[in-house]
Amino acid sequence: MTPTIAIFGASGDLTSRKLVPALFELYRKKRLPEGIRIVGFSRTRFSHEAWREKLAETTAQFVGERFDAELWRQFAPSIFYQPGDIDNPADFVALDGFLQSLEGDQPTTRIYYLSTAPQLYDAALAQLGAAGMTREDRGPRRVVIEKPFGTDLASAQSLNRKVHEAFDEHQVYRIDHYLGKETVQNILVLRFANSIFEPIWNRNYIDHVQITAAEDLTVGHRAAYYDSVGILRDMFQNHLLQLMTFTAMEAPAQFEANAIRDEKVKVLRSIRPMKPEEVANDTIRGQYRKYRDEPGVPPESETATFGAVKLHIDNWRWQDVPFLLRSGKAMSCRTTQIVIQFRAAPHMMFQGGPRAPFESNRLVIQVQPAEGVQLHFQTKVPDAGMKLRLTDLSFNFRDKFASGMPEAYQRLLLDVLHGDASLFSRADEVELAWSIIDPIQRGWEHPGWPPLALYESGGWGPPNSVEWMCRQYREWFDTCPVLK
Ligand code: BG6
């Protein structure tokens, strides 16, 4: 079935920066179904031709040297534009008519991609439902919903209700672009396609797990939006908790959407909800010093741009193994990494051996910028008595695979086209994630729970985050990408 993708909010940033470049790359790799139609819908008036020209420019900019003008000329006729207003039912009837005129009598897979401002999601869903565009009598109808999926549990539940008034859950694809990253998927392969990791992947061998998503960028032109969101909603509820569930979940019996999501949901259900009095002790919140000077940020803003959170999973595998999640803007570099910190050897007979538990084995799964895995272990320094040093074994995708690493959206768009929801969040999953974040967010709304610590740009967040780890006899793995 030749598919149609209708993008709502088509004149926005995401379409030009991510979606169309990803679709073009897929076209270049001959992965898109023959005859695919990509239709933009938003209020700005464009002719088909004017929109194609605008996208040619932005795609060339974001695809870089892989952009090929001749290929774009072949691809461009599959792109169309239909102006319309999300609030106007007649515009949806017109859109449906236009899509049918493209599709003819053949059954078609239709994908509705919501990339509008989130406050328009309810209206878009209701209009799609009311116009009869979600019925599957002429082929599959799917909806892709961009983040943020709500701003707390109550709003996520309300949005899920709106989604389910128009669509059945099997039609829904809630995006978290971290799940489209190759190394995130590779966590499952590392754990469940090898036999050597599984026996030690538990409380008997692992002291704690650190998950860091550091960005060197400041909030910049997104400051006005960011100020109402903050680091917990922006990074923890979605990306960090997704990384945590992939690291902690049990092996699903099949690589299949519901089997995978069932296991992730079990992890989320087992995360111990934080009590109000624990928020002050088990979290750190910070703000980079220049944040309040960003245009659009109120001078008294208490919005956190850095967060560190200690979570516990109450199940057999992970009892007493803290998961230390951390993310921040304006940090020393861009790196996303999962550090599995193993326990120290039970007895150290070498005088020159590690002095601290955090010098014992660790597995670093580097999600970005370079993707790969590094195993740290003690070795003997040659010609220096029995002096030991932590050294490593590295695997970097780039060294082993010539094909290059695709952008996350390529994989996710292909999965939606194929009807595979394994890498998308289910309704219960997003709600559970909010139920973990909400108590922390509520705690942070009290001044001093914990106090907002200012930090200099270009470091690893506020100094009290380091002290917080020291008090736990632990240390952050503050290393800019270990793999280049
Ligand atoms: C987005 C957040 O979801 O993820 C941004 O809204 C953040 O604030 C971005 O910068 C990080 O994504 P990536 O893929 O660059 O790590």
Image (cartoon, rainbow, N blue to C red):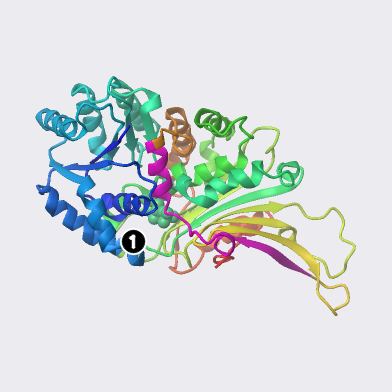
Q: x, y (%) of residue 299?
A: 28, 59
Q: Observer-nearest residue: 183 or 106?
A: 106
Q: Can residue 298 be seen by looking at this rendering?
A: no
Q: x, y (%) of residue 108?
A: 28, 30
The answer to whether residue 411 is magenta is: yes
Amino acid type at image mark 1: Val
Image quarter for residue 98? top left
Image quarter for residue 386? bottom right
Q: Can residue 245 be seen by looking at this rendering?
A: yes
Residue 355 falls left or right of residue 78: right
> Up-down: is 3 above or below 168?
below
Q: x, y (%) of residue 384?
A: 85, 79
Q: Quadrant of the C terminus?
A: bottom right
The answer to whether residue 467 is magenta is: no
Q: Observer-nearest residue: 161 or 18?
A: 18
Q: x, y (%) of residue 310?
A: 58, 46
The furthest residue to the bottom:
383
Q: Observer-nearest residue: 41 or 361?
A: 41
Residue visible at 67% across and 38% down? 318
Q: Which residues are magenta?
A: 389-417
Q: Quadrant of the N terminus?
A: top left
Residue that numbered label 1 is attached to:
63
Would the CB of label 1 be found within 8 Å of ligand 1?
Answer: no
Residue visible at 52% across and 53% down? 326
Residue 204 falls left or right of residue 2: right
Q: Which secondary structure, mark 1?
A: helix
Residue visible at 41% across and 43% down? 412
Q: Observer-nearest residue: 313 or 77?
A: 77
Residue visible at 22% across and 52% down? 76
> Up-down: is 214 above or below 277?
below
Image quarter for residue 173? top left
> Up-down: is 407 above or below 438?
below
